[in-house]
Image: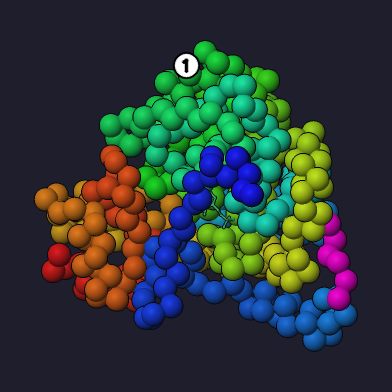
Amino acid sequence: MLSKRLDNLHPYVPGEQPKDRDYIKLNANENPYPPSEAVEEAVRALVSKKRMSLALYPDPASEKLRDAIASMINCTGGVLCRAVGKDGDEFACEPCESDKLPFEVTRDMVFCGNGSDEVLSLVFYTFFDSDRPLISPEHSYSFYPVYAGYYGIPLKKIPLNADWTLDKKAMLKSALETDSPIIFANPNAPTGRALTRDEIRKMLESAPKDRAFIVDEAYVDFGGESAISLLGEFKNLVIVRTFSKSMSLAGLRIGYVIANPEVIRAIETVKNSFNHFPIDVIAQTAGIAACRSCAYSAKNARAIADERDSFSAWLEKHGWTVIPSSTNFVFAKKDGKSGESLYRAIKEKGLLVRHFATAGIDDYLRITIGTSEQMNALKTAMETL
Ligand SMILES: *Cc1c(COP(=O)(O)O)cnc(C)c1O
């Protein structure tokens, strides 16, 4: 009865969402701050004054949401924690000097889907074939191997350097040998390490020009450098981003692509062959309000980045090894202790962090940065480990 394809599926296991106890949740890289009041007001207004809109299908192309995303990127430069506040009611941000874009992002450069997980699935279908390997770092987002299995795409995993950065040379060598596409997260997960924009430009210069080069920027708002400004030079660059981390909207499922219009049109063809309406009316409304109040999310991203830096320093002072992070989490280990036992000891004290039982990283914990209150509770729990 079951299809043969099912044998190739190895489903992704997300961070626990426990129901038995009120844990402090630092295990799924969610934002510890709620979305802005503007989001609340927009959703309230929708379900009261415009209740009829719930009875109708949403805009299949999410045009207003794509406009709002384009405006947000233009107003922030693409990295929230470095955006500079300015007066004004909407999109009250401007890019810092180093993030200024050399062109304007327009609606036809934006594609929206039901979380960046769905967006990544559509990107896999649009750009990767089973006739050549897809190049990816050995330790990166664990959904990439899952989708590779789903679509029957051979995945070539390239080991990281000893300092946990991506081995750019080895990735490029492999891509050139087989004329292959490349995918990685920048900053990377679960390591937290980032490549600079110049490093990505250099990779793009020698990578195969006729193959997609995918950069997953799920965490870029907490301190990485976005590759968006390179889109004018590289037509094969595809940037995937999400509202789940920096925009405090993991529960609404909004992900997007920023790329050149030809790339966006190709992904739309795949989307319209799969699910015409990936983003519901409430999510489109809330997403637009979240973009317009991006100054609020920018402030939260800065607070999280500051908290991350002080927590990293605390960990080092208490004998932990911490990989330098540009994200809203840290990846750290304590010599002589297994990651599993540390995870359990912290869980007993009422806090959840993430442990991966994967060879090479199983000594480490991935700890999401929360509010200062949450981090103080974590420090108290960790002091005695
Ligand atoms: C969280 C995460 C995603 C998925 O985000 P959603 O939009 O919630 O599906 C994608 N890529 C990376 C690297 C992530 O960490």
Other-residue count near label 1 (Cα within 10 Å), few / some / many at <14 / 14–19 / ≥20: few
Q: Residue at x 39, y 39 (%)?
A: 139
Q: Which residues are magenta?
A: 55-60
Residue 270 at x, y = what percent? 77, 42
Residue 365 at x, y = what percent? 29, 55
347 within the magenta span: no
State the residue position of label 1: 173
Is residue 156 visible in the rendered structure shown here? Answer: yes
Classified by dominant secondary structure, the portion drawn in magenta counts as: loop
Q: Residue at x 68, y 43 (%)?
A: 122
Query: What's the residue type where badge 1 is placed?
Result: Lys
Residue 256 at x, y = what percent? 67, 50
Which corner quadrant of the image does residue 71 belong to?
Answer: bottom right
Which corner quadrant of the image does residue 227 belong to?
Answer: top right
58 within the magenta span: yes
In this rendering, would 160 be left or right of 341? right
**Residue situated furthest top in the rendering:** 177
Q: Residue at x 71, y 80 (%)?
A: 41
Between residues 241 and 279, which one lies in front from this camera angle? 279
Between residues 273 and 203, which one lies in front from this camera angle? 273
In this rendering, would 358 be left or right of 253? left
**Residue situated furthest front in the rendering:** 1
Is residue 106 visible in the rendered structure shown here? Answer: no
Q: Which quarter of the rendered picture does the C terminus lie within?
A: bottom left
Q: Is residue 375 above or below residue 256?
A: below
Residue 138 at x, y = what percent? 40, 34
Q: Is residue 245 above or below residue 379?
A: above
Between residues 277 and 227, which one lies in front from this camera angle? 277
* SS at badge 1: helix
